[in-house]
Every structure is written in C-alpha cells, then in structure tokens.
Amino acid sequence: MAVQKKRGRKTKESKPMLFSALNYKLLGLGVFMVIVGFTVMRIENEVYGFISLYISPIVILVGYVVVIYAILKKDHKIEEPSSAPLSQ
C-alpha cells in the first residue's frame, strides 16, 4: 500500500499569539474611541464649541491611553517556553 501525503500547508511548530483576546478587544475599543472623538469634533464643526474644546479631546486622549495600555498589558496566563519548569 502506498502512503499518501497530505496536501496543503506544512504545519510548523505553532508560536503563541502576541496578544491575548482581551488585548485585542481593548485595542479595538481604544481605536474606536479615537475615531469617535475625531468624528464628533468634526460633526460639531465649530472651533469654539463646547464639544470640540472639552469633550472630544478627552475622549481622544482616553482612547490613546486605552490603546497604549492594551499594547503594554501582559497576560499572566500565557507562559513563555523558557520560563516553564521542567518535569521529570
């Protein structure tokens, strides 16, 4: 009997994801907040309006802080291969 080879991609050793699911959700939320802040600032279309001067910059700043936090947050559940204890 001939051995049939599987066609398709060769599977290599899979690497762990760079971020966890929570990181990606926070990153999406932060980008969404930045987009909403700039959109609301543009919709009001006044230079000295209340929303353009006070609300939108705060929303944009919070969005940037959330994005930075999402990038820097490390998930403690994911262990690196070098730090795993060896079982004997």
Image (cartoon, helix red, strand yellow):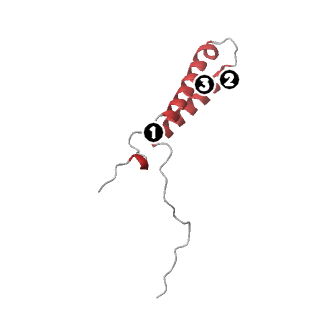
Q: Residues within 10 Å of mark 3 (few under 14, many from 20)?
A: many
The mark nearer the N terminus, 3 or 1, is 1
Q: Residues within 10 Å of mark 1 (few under 14, many from 20)?
A: few
In the structure shown, which secondary structural element does the residue marked by tag 3 occupy? helix
Say which residue label 2 marks. 42
Decide if residue 13 is on the left or right side of residue 44.
left
The mark nearer the N terminus, 2 or 3, is 3
Q: For the residues marked 2 and 1, what is the alpha-carbon distance in whole angstroms?
A: 30 Å
What label sits on residue 22 in the rendered view? Answer: 1
Q: Residue at x 58, y 33 (%)?
A: 31
- Please report contact status of discs 2 and 3: CB closer than 8 Å, yes or no: no
Residue 88, image x, y percentages = 29, 57
Q: For the residues marked 2 and 3, what is the alpha-carbon distance in whole angstroms?
A: 9 Å
Residue 68, image x, y percentages = 54, 30
Q: Residue at x 61, y 12 (%)?
A: 50
**Callout 3, which amino acid?**
Gly
Work out whether 43 lies above or below 50: below
In the structure shown, which secondary structural element does the residue marked by tag 1 occupy? helix
Instruction: Pick the residue in front: 44 or 13.
Output: 13
In the structure shown, which secondary structural element does the residue marked by tag 2 occupy? helix
Q: Residues within 10 Å of mark 2 (few under 14, many from 20)?
A: some
What label sits on residue 37 in the rendered view? Answer: 3
